[in-house]
Image: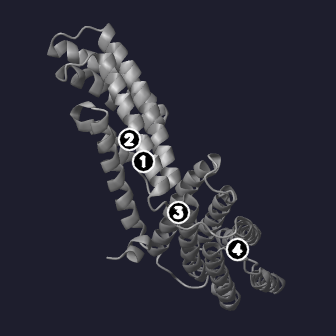
Amino acid sequence: MNLTTILGNPRLRFCLRVTTSAIVAFTLAQVLSIPLHGLWAVLTAVVVTQMSVGGSLKATTDYIIGTLGGAVYGSAIAVLVPHPDPLAVAGTLALAIVPLAYAAALNPSFRVAPFTAVIVLLISSQLGEAPIESALYRLLEVVIGGAVAVVVSLLVFPARAHALGLDAAGRVLELMANALPRLLAAFTASTDPLENNRIQDEIGQAVSTFQATADEAMRERMVNLIAEPDPGPLARTLLRLRHDLVIIGRAGVAPLPERISGRLPTPLNKLGAAGRDYFLACAAALTSRKSAPPLEPIDAAIAAYASEIAAIRAAGLTQGLPVGDLEHIFGLGFALQQLQHNFADMQRVVQDWARGSTLSGKSVAP
């Protein structure tokens, strides 16, 4: 396995970063003569090293906040509440864990606080340390591990959340490209509802993944690690496009009556093809940091569909239709209007990313 292979595989780069973090943290613990060979420093470095720099920053911040809260409260309980026997220790543990667990339920940053309090209460006596001394050691180790994780994330095959986010956004757009023609086909022919639900769930999961990466990218921007466009507009636009597809899917739960559906395959097929091509072109433009594709094919396809619906109404074919079918027709029309608007937003977002790449000189390496 050569260096080129490693550089081209984000999972291998992540493995190297985690391993480097563990070794560096262990080495520092030996230099500082931290008890237990710096166990918690090494564990912290491994746990908070994430796929991107922004992810490591977030994990380190949360871990330090949680450890500080758990160490301070746990040591206070250990000093103030006597616990000479196992029953008293159990009561002291409950007294320490209950409020910290509640704090963790309110704020994810405190997730490690109960764990830290338990360490301070149970391990300090085994090591011959006073509770406050144990708490200080735990906090010191977490700070060392977190600092090592962030530095390694910055220096060892660094992965920027912006670059990872573009790949995730491209994945979302590719899923939407595959889904749109199928969802539109449901208005004129029977489709498998379970398969449609699976497609919608897959898109939803992909959007959530991108939003998490966008949050990490925002942290990178806050500490001025890189000058990149704000990922927020892209995240909001993808979420709105996902909602458009949900509305289309709900409107197309069953084919429309033959007198309507018989006239819609051609405009809907053209619209599905235009939408698919636009999604794919936007995905390619984002990942390559190029200009956005034109909107004219989308606008023409939506106009052709609207024209056909107007002709259907003029011919009186919608008269006497069940209310449910009319709702589906109106629902599709509304969703297509929103889709057209959000396609225009996507074009602006892609253009912003292309301009950002030009201003920064070149794309940031993944």
CA distance separating discs 4 and 2: 58 Å
Residue occupying the point 72% across, 76% down:
292
Residues 229 and 233: in front is 229
Q: Nearer the viewer, residue 200 or 218?
A: 218
- Cα separation, mark 1 vs mark 4, equals 54 Å
Q: Closer to the N terminus: mark 2 or mark 3?
A: 2
The amino acid pointed to by label 2 is Gly
User: Can you identify the residue that label 1 sits on?
Assistant: 149
Q: Which label sits on residue 145?
A: 2
Report if the CB atoms under discs 1 and 2 are less than 8 Å apart.
yes
Q: Nearer the viewer, mark 3 or mark 4?
A: 3
Cβ atoms at labels 3 and 4 below 8 Å apart: no
Q: Residue at x 42, y 76 (%)?
A: 4
- Which amino acid is tagged 3? Gly
Discs 2/3, front:
2
Classify mark 4: residues with Cα within 10 Å, few (<14), some (14-19) or many (20+): many
Residue 300's place in the image compared with 166, above or below, is below
Query: Is the C-beta separation of discs 4 and 2 under 8 Å?
Result: no
Considering only order in the chain, which callout, 4 or 1, is on the residue closer to the N terminus? Answer: 1
First along the sequence among labels 3 and 4: 3
Label 1 Cα crowd, 10 Å radius (few <14 / some 14-19 / many 20+): many
Residue at which label 4 appears: 329
Residue of label 3: 204
